[in-house]
Image (cartoon, rainbow, N blue to C red):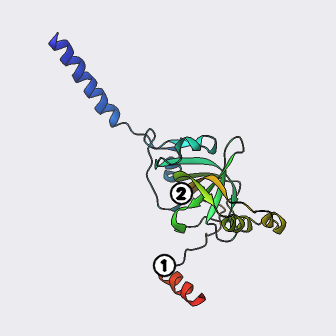
Amino acid sequence: MFNRLHTVVMCSAAAAMLLAGCTHPTRAQKAIDQGWITFGTPVETTRGVNPEVTPENLKEHADTAELVVLSGTVSDVCRTMGCWLEIAGPSGLKVRVMNKDHAFFVPRNARGRKVYAIGQATYTEHSVEMLKHLAADAGKPQAEIDAITQPEKSLVFIAQAVILPGSGLEAPVQPAPAAAAASTEGASK
């Protein structure tokens, strides 16, 4: 009895070690390995560790601090600097992707392209002022911007990295160095 139990335990342990060594990259990681361009901080992702989601099932991962891979098609981009984008899923459901800490920007001509974003999902309440700013950045008509009168809580994806196919993209706007941004702020006050 002991030998059979010992054999089962040893086989189970060996199988677990073997499976632990079998890691597979996410589709985003494969895209990076195939030469897609990463904007932001490259983060290695692994299937089974980092969930791969679309806007349709992103809310399941909201406010968990879980690092996920969001995929879809770029439906809109900030036209001013490329500091945010919207990703649409297969059903057309969209989620706004904000670039973490405004640390990077994406090309403003990325609309219509397949995209992966790596980061966390969270619910955020945007003020009326921020909603109007985002609408202006999206090129909305002034009447639509003026109609914004209430804050809005929505699901937002905070991206550490955005991965896009490289061909045909314009160069993104370059973030200002922190020191230059601070001196500009001081000069405008």
Classify mark 1: residues with Cα within 10 Å, few (<14), some (14-19) or many (20+).
few
- Disc 2 secondary structure class: strand
Give the percent coordinates (x, y) of residue 159: 53, 57
Residue type (three-letter) at the residue carrying disc 1: Ala
* Residue depicted at x 80% and y 67%: 146
| Residue located beneath label 2 in the image | 159
Q: Quadrant of residue 93?
A: top right
Quick one: which residue is furthest to the bottom in this view? 187
* Residue depicted at x 76% and y 62%: 148
| Residue located beneath label 1 in the image | 178
Residue type (three-letter) at the residue carrying disc 2: Ala
Count all numbered tags in the image, as a single digit: 2
In the image, taking residue 67 as reference, residue 89 lies left or right, namely right
The alpha-carbon separation of the residues under discs 1 and 2 comes to 20 Å
Question: Is 158 in front, or is 80?
Answer: 158
Asked if residue 116 can be seen in this view, the reply is yes
